[in-house]
Image (cartoon, grey):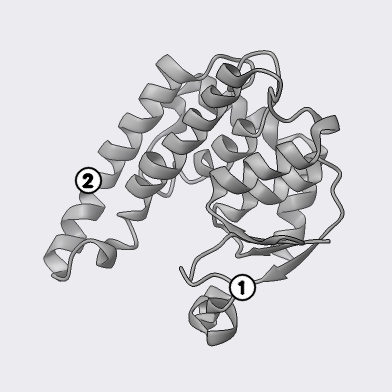
C-alpha cells in the first residue's frame, strides 16, 4: 500500500493527481502546516527534510516530486504516464520535471520563504518584488520553448502534465498574469476538467 503525505496548496498535488491517473490504491496523510506538523519528530522520522510530499512505499520513503512521479509512472506502466520504452523520451520527461522542481518552484518560493536564502527582512522584500519577473520568465520559456502541446510532451499525457498544472495554479498569487501565456493557460483549463484532477483537489481540500 502506498501512502502519500501531503499538504493542501503545495506541489504534493502533482503526485496526488498522478496516483489517481494511475488508478493506484493508496492512502493519504495530511501534514498540517498551520501547526508546523512538518517539523514534528513524527514527520521528520518520515521525511527529515521537513517538507511535502513524501510517498511511503513497501521499499521505503520517497521524496522530491520528480522522483515520486517517475516511480508512479514506472510502477503502473498500464496507465501510460511516461514513455517508459524510450530512454531519450523518458529523459525529456525527467528534464522538464526537473526544471519545474529546481527552477520554477524555487522562483515561486522566494515570495514566502525568503528565510531559506537570507536573514535580513529587507532581503525578503527584495525577493518578493523579484518574483513576478522570475516566475514570469520561467513560464515564458515553458510557453515558447518547452510546451509541445496539446500536452507537455505533445500528443501523449504524461507525468509532466499534473506537475505543470500544479505550479501554473500559483501564477496569479505570484503576480503573473496567465493571459500572457495562452498555451499554459489552456493547458491549465483542460487539466482542471479531468476527473482525476478534480478528485485529487477535492480530497486535499476536505
Q: Secondary structure at mark 2?
A: helix
Residue 84 falls in which quadrant of the image? top right
In the rendered structure, the answer to whether residue 126 lies left or right of residue 163 reads: left
Q: Where residue 170 appears, x then y in whole percent?
A: 48, 46
Q: Secondary structure at mark 1?
A: loop
| Residue at 49% from the left image edge and 29% from the top image edge | 96
Mark closer to the observer (2, 1): 1
Give the residue at mark 2: 130
Image quarter of the C terminus: bottom right
| Residue at 58% from the left image edge and 39% from the top image edge | 163
Of the two numbered discs 2 and 1 on the same chain, state the one appearing first in sequence. Answer: 1
Give the residue at mark 1: 31
| Residue at 67% from the left image edge and 28% from the top image edge | 158
In the rendered structure, the answer to whether residue 172 lies left or right of residue 45 reads: left
Residue occupying the far front of the picture: 59
Q: Which class describes the residues within 10 Å of circle 2: few (<14), some (14-19), or many (20+)?
A: some
Mark 2–mark 1 Cα distance, whole angstroms, equals: 29 Å
Q: Where residue 56 appears, x then y in whole percent?
A: 70, 63
Q: Where residue 8 appears, x then y in whole percent?
A: 61, 62
Q: Which mark is residue 190?
A: none
Residue 126 falls in which quadrant of the image? bottom left
- Residue 71 vertical position relative to residue 60 in the rendered view, above or below: above
Front in this rendered view, residue 55 or 125: 55
Front in this rendered view, residue 167 or 92: 92
Amino acid at each position: 500500500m502506498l501512502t502519500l503525505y501531503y499538504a493542501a496548496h503545495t506541489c504534493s498535488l502533482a503526485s496526488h493527481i498522478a496516483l489517481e491517473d494511475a488508478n493506484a490504491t493508496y492512502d493519504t496523510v495530511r501534514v498540517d502546516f498551520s501547526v508546523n506538523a512538518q517539523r514534528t519528530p513524527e514527520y521528520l522520522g518520515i521525511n527529515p527534510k521537513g517538507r511535502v510530499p513524501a510517498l511511503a512505499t513497501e521499499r521505503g520513503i520517497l521524496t522530491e516530486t520528480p522522483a515520486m512521479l517517475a516511480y508512479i509512472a514506472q510502477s503502473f506502466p498500464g496507465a501510460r504516464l511516461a514513455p517508459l520504452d524510450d530512454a531519450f523520451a523518458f529523459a525529456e520527461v525527467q528534464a522538464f520535471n526537473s526544471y519545474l522542481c529546481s527552477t520554477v518552484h524555487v522562483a515561486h518560493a522566494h515570495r514566502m520563504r525568503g528565510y531559506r536564502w537570507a536573514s535580513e527582512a529587507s532581503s525578503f522584500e527584495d525577493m518578493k518584488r523579484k518574483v513576478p519577473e522570475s516566475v514570469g520568465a520561467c513560464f515564458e520559456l515553458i510557453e515558447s520553448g518547452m510546451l509541445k502541446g496539446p500536452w507537455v510532451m505533445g500528443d501523449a499525457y504524461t507525468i509532466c502534465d499534473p506537475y505543470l498544472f500544479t505550479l501554473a495554479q500559483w501564477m496569479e498569487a505570484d503576480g503573473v498574469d496567465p493571459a500572457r501565456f495562452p498555451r499554459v493557460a489552456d493547458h491549465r483549463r483542460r487539466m482542471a476538467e479531468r476527473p482525476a484532477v478534480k478528485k485529487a483537489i477535492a480530497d486535499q481540500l476536505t
